[in-house]
Image: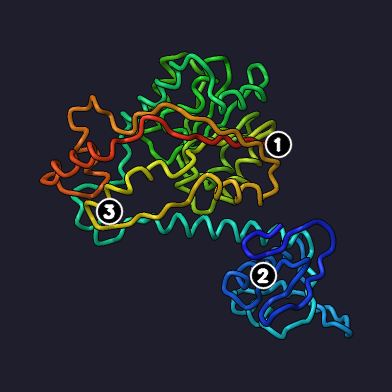
Amino acid sequence: MLTGGLALRAGPRIARRGAPNELREGGLAVRLGGDECAVVLADAARNRAKGGGALHLERTGLVRSVGWRADLRSPRDAHAIAAPGACDTCLVSDDAMATADVVVQERRWADLLGRLAIPAEILESAEESPYRFDPAVFEAAALGALDRHMDSAADRAARDALPPGGSVLDVGVGGGAASLRLGRDGARLVGVDASRELLEVFSNLASAGGIDATAVEGTWPDVAASVPVADVVVCHNVVYNVPALGAFTRALGRHATARVVIELTAEHPLAWMRPYWRALHGLDRPDGPTADDAIAVVAATGADLHVERSTRSVEVVDGAHPDAVGQLARRLCVARDRDGEVARLMEEHPPPTTRAVVTLWWDA
C-alpha cells in the first residue's frame, strides 16, 4: 500500500535505492530528505523510546545496522540520517511504519483543514465572529433526532453494539443529537463538549426526557483521563474541527469497550458556501478535506473500519428564521449593509436540502 509517499505492508521491509533521493520496494518509492519524511522518521524514532518500533539503516555489503537514537529531538536530526547517500538499503519495522503512516495521514488532514482558515484580514473586518455556535441550532438538531421515526445508520451501528442498560459516551455532544435517542431507550449517557452553553442544552433535554445523563465540560482528548469508559462511543459532526485526528480517534477507541461510531458529512458542512465566498470576497475556497481523507487517517490507526454512506434531508439555513439572511451574512463575514447581495446569492445558489453523510464504525 502506498500512503503519503510511504510503502506500507506486512512483514520485513527492504527498500532498495532507486533514483537519487529515493528508496524503492516493489516499485513503490520512499522519498528521503524531504521535510515530511523527516518528521515521520523523527516521530518513529521518538516512538522507539516508548517501546514502539525502531528504524534501522543498513549499508549493502557491510550489513551494518545503524539504530535510530532514542534521543532524537528534531526533524533536522532525522534529515541528516535519512539524507541521500545515507544508505543503500533501508529496513523499517512494521510498528514504526504504522506510526509513520498515521503521522503522514494526520499531517495531510491538518494541512487540508488549515487551508480552510478564513484569512486574517477578512476576520478582522467582520462585525461578528463567524465561529459562534448558536445553542438554538443544536437544540433543534437534537429535537429533530429525537423525532425521527427511523434510526439513522449511525443510530443502528451504536444500538447493535449497546447492551441493555449500557453506557454511551458522546464526544462533541452539542445538544445531544447523537446520543439522546439511545438514552431514551435506557442507556446511560456521558456528554463531553467544550461549550458550557451546549452542555446546558444537552442536560436540559436529557432531564426533560427522564434520561440518565452526565455533562463533562472540556476539549477531547484533553479531558479523556477524567471521563469513564463506555460500551459505545459516538462522535457526530466533529472531525472537521479536529486537526490532530489520529490522536483524537485513538482516544475514542481507548474509551470504548464495544464500539466506536463516527458520523460526518461527505464533504465539509460549509462547502456549499464556496460560490458565496467567491462572490463576496473574491476568495476561492478549497475542495477538501472530505470524509475520504478522514477515513484514511482513522484507517491508518489500525481500526478495522466499516463505512456506510447515506443521504439525509437537511435545513442548513432556517428559512423560517426572521433573520436568516443575517445569520448567513455573519458566517460569511460581511456587514449587514450587504444583506441584499447575500439574499441574491441565496436565490442563485440555494442552500442544499439534502446532504451526503458517512458513518464510520469499528469494534473495540
Amino acid type at mark 3 = Arg
Confirm or deny contact between disc 3 and disc 1 (CB under 8 A).
no
Give how far across and how far down residue 348 sits, in percent.
24, 40
Q: Quadrant location of residue 350? A: top left
Residue 153 as seen in the image, left or right of residue 177: right
User: Which residue in the structure is indicated by mark 3?
Assistant: 278
Element marked by disc 1: loop
Q: Residue at x 66, y 76 (%)?
A: 32
User: Which residue in the structure is indicated by mark 2?
Assistant: 41
Mark 2–mark 3 distance (CA, rounded to whole Å): 40 Å
Q: Residue at x 35, y 42 (%)?
A: 272
- Relative to residue 153, is residue 45 depicted above or below? below
User: Which residue in the structure is indicated by mark 1?
Assistant: 364
Mark 3–mark 1 distance (CA, rounded to whole Å): 44 Å
Q: Quadrant location of residue 19? A: bottom right
37 or 273, which is in the foreground? Answer: 273
Among the two numbered marks 2 and 1 on one chain, the one whose residue lies closer to the N terminus: 2
Amino acid type at mark 2 = Leu
Confirm or deny contact between disc 2 and disc 3 (CB under 8 A).
no
Q: Residue at x 62, y 62 (%)?
A: 4
- Relative to residue 19, is residue 349 depicted above or below? above
Among the two numbered marks 2 and 3 on one chain, the one whose residue lies closer to the N terminus: 2
Give how far across and how far down residue 249 sits, in percent.
59, 45
Element marked by disc 2: helix
Residue 250 as seen in the image, left or right of residue 332: right
Among the two numbered marks 3 and 1 on one chain, the one whose residue lies closer to the N terminus: 3
Confirm or deny contact between disc 2 and disc 1 (CB under 8 A).
no
Quarter of the image with the N terminus is bottom right
Quarter of the image with the C terminus is top right
Give how far across and how far down residue 53 sits, in percent.
76, 62
Amino acid type at mark 1 = Ala
